[in-house]
């Protein structure tokens, strides 16, 4: 299948750009063959030059220019993976944050450009777009914050550097490349060298990138390719596989509309470090049944991928996606105006014997997903938090951040469900009741004299775990920070659910503070089969949650902290379920202890009543027989 690509009418300011060739499908369900020209980066509104493998210099291809011939880059960039910076986009249910960690300064800070309660906006703590991308771009498909590198800086040097390094445009191949040789891990290597412009090219299966933009001077022009004065420093260079270029310098790219699960897994994997038996860990039941990620998480050209949770705010033209939540797919909503339940062959459970209050108070995942409630909690690693899949990643179980999984907490819509949890830990300033975190590099500058006391914990630091903090170390660091930046507020340290500060006498005060509360986000996978759900097995299933010491409510969630005095702490799970009264649920659960006895008592009482009724019934029959016998005579 071939394409004829032409230039349509230009759109005037204020007008919506006309759809491009690939923005509107023609109805054919086969996949178009993408034999296309690679185009280099160009100024806004201009067409990038066609790349040939023998060019001098050989430039990286731009996905904005290459894919943008047929697909609207602006529409794509409005999608969920790219629109976190847009304040007009509903934040929706809290999701996994980016977690800034630094073992040396005992920092574990949840970040997000979306206004999720408990997270901090990178811009508010002076974390520039460039620094953010260098930290987390390894597990980003580009775009979003990658598209504004150098734009929001008042520093002219930063603007010049952005011309050298380029921006991190949306890399369509991160998701849509079906080629086995696609190597998303290469993105991390390129970002470490400030090769933002070259990162997408380096991930594809037909090009290699060498050299480093970090080593180039501010006035170096990547489009001229002039070598730097220092011969030891090598500029970024691209080498394409010549055999992949066809006539007119076209290249076949194995683009997949149905994104393979392996592409999703690179950024969305979770590893249970508590469980040593990884071989026998089961995959999500939906995946084993033949479904893939995008069967439920769908989107159109706008890439507004639905997150598939109940109550999600959907676009008016995407109402059908409501049936792709757990409830919508398996149960429907009873309305004939929308698609009925049983989508994609989903079984329709009857939930016999389960009181309806469970469906008002619990998410579907509460019974069907994640690790079962237990007094032993699961510590997990995720791709985005622990850089899984990249070279040199630390495999120690203690590596930060410490994420606890299987915590049953109240979440979106006031329903209880399984969550992942992280305890924030960071240094900051307290001013007018608001806490502003301090970046680890700034902490090191402020508290340089006090930090060497932490170096005694070298083994912990080598494993990527934080060092143990004593009250003396905390006092010294707070004093050092306060002596240099007193106008920003009182220096504080947040950790283990507590705020640490100095009083007027210089003594350490430890107190409660909302900013120290754990950040939780719901987990949906892995989904277990119905036979392994909570509540299965009649009366025995009730005991999964309704006993006086049921882990669902009363398991001790560990408090994670580098402060020695807080490391043995814990909170009851019910404390993360504010809609549940701890004493009330304990009393209710305690009643289940007597329910078997009550059932026996009721059955015995019913038997006695039946015998009494039978006795009086027999006497009544005898009396009636006498009466009727007398009448007959």
Image (tube, rainbow, N blue to C red):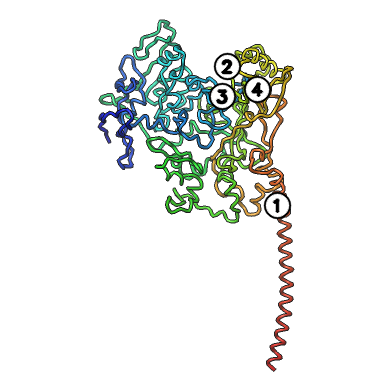
Q: Residues within 10 Å of mark 3 (few under 14, many from 20)?
A: many
CA–CA distance between discs 1 and 3? 45 Å
Q: Secondary structure at mark 2?
A: helix
x and y, in percent, of residue 525 in the image? 54, 40
Sequence-earlier tag: 2 or 4: 2
524 relative position to 427: left or right: left
625 relative position to 71: left or right: right
Which residue is at a point 56% across and 29% down the rendered structure image? 119
In the image shown, does 5 or 202 lie closer to the viewer?
Answer: 5
x and y, in percent, of residue 427 in the image? 62, 21
- Specify the label residue 441 is tagged with: 2
Q: Closer to us: mark 4 or mark 3?
A: 4
Circles 1, 2 touching at the beta carbon (< 8 Å): no
Q: Closer to us: mark 2 or mark 4?
A: 4
Depicted 357 relative to depicted 403: above or below: below
CA–CA distance between discs 4 and 3? 15 Å
**On the image, numbered disc 3 is attached to which residue?**
100
CA–CA distance between discs 1 and 2? 55 Å
Which residue is at a point 70% across and 49% down the rendered structure image? 588
Q: Residue furthest front?
A: 432
Sequence-earlier tag: 1 or 4: 4
218 relative position to 276: left or right: left
CA–CA distance between discs 2 and 3? 12 Å
Which residue is at a point 48% across and 48% down the rendered structure image? 328
Q: Residues within 10 Å of mark 4 (few under 14, many from 20)?
A: many
**On the image, numbered disc 4 is attached to which residue?**
493
Q: Residues within 10 Å of mark 1 (few under 14, many from 20)?
A: some
**On the image, numbered disc 1 is attached to which residue?**
592
CA–CA distance between discs 2 and 4? 15 Å
Sequence-earlier tag: 1 or 3: 3
Quadrant in the picture for residue 46? top left
């Amino acid at each position: 299948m071939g394409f004829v690509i032409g230039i349509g009418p230009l759109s005037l300011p204020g007008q919506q750009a006309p759809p491009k060739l690939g923005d509107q499908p023609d109805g054919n369900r086969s996949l178009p063959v993408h034999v296309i020209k690679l185009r280099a980066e160009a100024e806004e509104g201009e067409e990038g030059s066609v790349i040939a493998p023998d060019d001098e210099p050989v430039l990286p291809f731009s996905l904005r220019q290459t894919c943008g011939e047929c697909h609207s880059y602006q529409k794509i960039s409005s999608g969920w993976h790219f629109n976190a910076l847009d304040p007009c986009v509903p934040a929706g249910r809290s999701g996994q944050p980016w977690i800034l960690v630094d073992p040396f300064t005992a920092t574990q800070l949840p970040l997000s450009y979306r206004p999720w309660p408990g997270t901090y906006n990178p811009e508010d703590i002076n974390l520039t777009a460039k620094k953010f991308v260098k930290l987390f771009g390894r597990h980003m498909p580009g775009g979003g914050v990658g598209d504004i590198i150098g734009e929001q800086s008042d520093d002219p040097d930063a603007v010049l550097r952005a011309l050298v390094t380029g921006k991190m445009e949306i890399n369509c191949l991160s998701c849509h490349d079906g080629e086995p040789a696609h190597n998303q891990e290469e993105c991390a290597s390129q970002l470490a060298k400030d090769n933002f412009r070259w990162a997408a090219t380096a991930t594809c299966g037909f090009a290699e990138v060498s050299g480093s933009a970090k080593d180039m001077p501010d006035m170096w022009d990547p489009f001229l390719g002039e070598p730097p004065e220092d011969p030891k420093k090598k500029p970024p260079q691209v080498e394409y596989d010549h055999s992949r270029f066809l006539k007119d310098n076209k290249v076949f790219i194995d683009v997949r509309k149905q994104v393979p699960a392996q592409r999703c897994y690179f950024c969305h994997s979770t590893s249970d470090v508590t469980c040593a038996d990884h071989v026998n860990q089961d995959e999500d039941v939906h995946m084993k049944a033949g479904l893939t990620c995008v069967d439920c998480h769908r989107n159109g050209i706008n890439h507004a991928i639905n997150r598939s949770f109940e109550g999600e705010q959907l676009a008016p033209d995407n109402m059908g996606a409501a049936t792709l939540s757990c409830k919508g797919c398996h149960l429907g909503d009873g309305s004939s105006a929308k698609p009925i339940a049983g989508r994609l062959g989903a079984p329709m459970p009857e939930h016999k014997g389960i009181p309806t209050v469970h469906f008002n108070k619990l998410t579907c995942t509460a019974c069907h997903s994640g690790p079962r409630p237990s007094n032993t909690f699961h510590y997990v690693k995720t791709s985005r938090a622990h850089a899984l899949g990249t070279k040199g990643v630390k495999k120690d179980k203690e590596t930060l951040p410490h994420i606890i999984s299987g915590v049953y907490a109240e979440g979106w819509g006031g329903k209880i469900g399984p969550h992942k949890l992280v305890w924030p830990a960071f240094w900051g300033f307290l001013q007018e009741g608001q806490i502003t975190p301090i970046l680890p590099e700034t902490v090191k500058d402020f508290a340089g004299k006090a930090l060497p006391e932490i170096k005694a914990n070298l083994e912990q630091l080598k494993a990527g775990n934080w060092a143990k903090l004593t009250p003396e170390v905390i006092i010294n660091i707070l004093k050092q920070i306060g002596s240099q930046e007193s106008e920003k507020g009182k220096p504080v340290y947040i950790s283990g659910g507590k705020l640490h500060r100095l009083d007027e006498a210089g003594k350490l005060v430890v107190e409660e503070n909302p900013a120290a509360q754990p950040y939780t986000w719901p987990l949906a996978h892995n989904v277990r089969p119905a036979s392994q759900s909570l509540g299965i097995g009649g009366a025995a299933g009730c005991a999964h949650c309704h006993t006086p010491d049921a882990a669902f409510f009363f398991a001790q969630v560990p408090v994670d902290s580098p402060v020695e005095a807080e490391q043995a702490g814990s909170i009851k799970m019910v404390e993360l379920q504010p809609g549940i009264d701890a004493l009330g649920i304990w009393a209710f659960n305690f009643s289940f202890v007597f329910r078997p006895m009550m059932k026996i008592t009721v059955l015995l009482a019913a038997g006695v009543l039946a015998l009494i009724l039978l006795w009086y019934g027999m006497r009544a029959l005898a009396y009636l027989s006498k009466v009727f016998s007398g009448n007959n005579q």
